[in-house]
């Protein structure tokens, strides 16, 4: 088992990662009867995509003796209605100005990010806009 989730009431969940004991909480968003005091479940999907992209890139980069430390990622979620769902996720990676790579290395890393497990697990109707901004 990966995690244990307890519904705390008032549209909040407490999620415990069983291997580490780390806890995250989720709330329903304010536009769907929630308090918006925590990530919403759909926010965590978007964050999962962004962290998976940089994590898989980080694994590949380490094999290439490249350090991606300091990379910032901006994530934007676009919701659709009827049925309510994520329609589009925008992910913008901003690499440190000190990172100087040739085009071949950039292509390898971008392909790695584009093929991360979360991206490959999402429904094909979900539009993904991923941009790689090399300084």
Image (tube, rainbow, N blue to C red):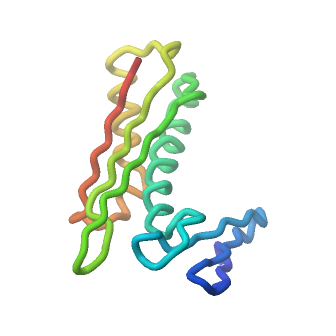
Is 22 left, or right, of 10 in this rendering? right
- What residue do we see at 46% from left, 48% from top? 50
- What residue do we see at 59% from left, 64% from top? 38
Q: Position of residue 55 (x, y in %)?
A: 54, 44
Toward the viewer: 81 or 110?
Answer: 81
Position of 130 relative to 39 (above/below): above
Q: Position of residue 17 (x, y in %)?
A: 70, 68
- What residue do we see at 64% from left, 73% from top? 2
Is 60 left, or right, of 22 in this rendering? left
Is 35 left, or right, of 102 in this rendering? right
Toward the viewer: 33 or 19?
Answer: 33
Residue farthest to the right, as pictured: 21
Q: Position of residue 74 (x, y in %)?
A: 44, 41
Name the quadrant of the N terminus: bottom right
Position of 108 relative to 34 (above/below): above
Is 42 left, or right, of 69 in this rendering? left
Name the quadrant of the C terminus: top left
Position of 65 relative to 131 (above/below): above
Count of marks overlaid on the render: 0
- What residue do we see at 28% from left, 52% from top? 128
Q: Position of residue 126 (x, y in %)?
A: 26, 62
Quadrant for residue 14, please give it: bottom right
């Amino acid at each position: 088992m990966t995690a244990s989730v307890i519904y705390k009431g008032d549209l909040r969940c407490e999620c415990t990662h069983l291997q580490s004991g780390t806890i995250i909480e989720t709330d329903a968003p304010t536009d769907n009867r929630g308090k918006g005091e925590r990530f919403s479940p759909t926010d965590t999907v978007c964050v999962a995509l962004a962290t998976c992209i940089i994590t898989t890139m980080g694994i590949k980069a380490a094999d290439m003796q490249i350090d991606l430390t300091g990379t910032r990622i901006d994530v934007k979620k676009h919701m659709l209605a009827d049925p309510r769902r994520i329609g589009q996720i925008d992910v913008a990676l901003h690499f440190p100005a000190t990172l100087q790579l040739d085009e071949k290395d950039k292509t390898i890393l971008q392909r790695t990010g584009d093929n991360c497990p979360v991206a490959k697990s999402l429904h094909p109707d979900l539009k993904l806009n991923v941009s790689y901004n090399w300084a």
